[in-house]
Amino acid sequence: MKKAKGSLKVIFIISFIFLLVSSVSAQGKIEFGFHYSGWSMNVLRGLIEGMLEDGLESALKDDFLSDIQGDYPYLEEESYEQNVSFDSSGDNYGFELRWYPGGHDGSFSLGLSVEKTTMRVALTDISAQMDLNPDAFFEAGGSAEFLIKPLSFHLSFRWDLFPSSRIRPYFTFGFGAATAAALENAELSYSYSGELNIQNQIHESYSESETKTLGEIVEEIEDDDEEFTLPGFFPFIQLNLGLKGEITRNVYLLFDAGIWNGFMLRGGLAVSV
């Protein structure tokens, strides 16, 4: 009986969507589309590396010094230098339903889409050198990575310029969100290894690596009786310019570039009904 009720619900939802699309299509034009994008933040690499250099210097130096003084408490910092290299990569694909109220030659359209995005931001090379007193030197290298793969839902507004032309530029603005689960399942990983040389006689090696989800990190913070709450959703902002080419009256190729919580290059195919 439960299976029958479930089947009836599915049939009802499919029928409702079919009737909705049919009704909207009668008043304008509907497009179904698929797209794939490359994602990156490397356009801002220089700026990000500069910010990370300043932001991480104190934290990394304190962590290294704490490890060293745990074994050799008499050593004191004399000087410290570090370099950070940033990299990012990712992709996105999605399915979109777009409505043109003005029909085939209409300019404005409203889009609803389901998107799967992978975003990886990494410190691919962290190098540090520390001089210590008396007569000691510490050198370390490491890396860190943050990886998130949200499934999100989006609303977008598009304006086609010269909508009656076979090749038309367009502008899109939109926003969307993924649930808190995207943040909870996001992974943060790091690793480092270093070597301490004291008076060219003592050589001590240090290393550490770990991978955790943000959800696990929050649980550890809460276990220490500290309060920390992840946001209830992961937001997206979309702002891009593109070109739309009409292959036939009902089939289109699209290419665009712009902002998608970073920078994206996108290609897609759309079919109108």
Image (cartoon, grey):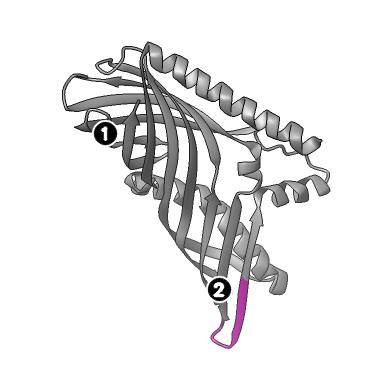
Q: Could you tell me if the residues under marks 2 and 1 are in contact, i.e. CB atoms within 8 Å?
A: no
Which residue matches tag 1?
A: 252
Question: Who is closer to the viewer here, 83 or 202?
Answer: 83
Q: Is residue 225 one of those drawn in magenta?
A: no
Neighbour tally class for label 1: few under 14, some 14-19, many 20 plus, Cα within 10 Å: some
Nearer mark to the viewer, of 2 and 1: 1
Q: Relative to residue 16, is residue 11 depicted above or below?
A: below
- Residue 214 vertical placement versus 65 (above, below): above
Q: Which mark is residue 26?
A: none
Q: Amino acid at mark 1?
A: Tyr
Closer to us: 1 or 260:
1
| Residue drawn 50% across the image and 62% down it | 80
Q: Main secondary structure of the magenta part?
A: strand
Q: Nearer the viewer, residue 187 or 30?
A: 30
* Residue at the spot 76% in from the left edge and 51% down from the top edge: 220
Dividing the picture into quadrants, the one containing residue 193 is: bottom right
* Residue 58 point in image, percent of width and height: 56, 52
Residue 105 placement (x, y as % from top left): 24, 16
Write the start and end of the magenta stretch as one range: 198-207
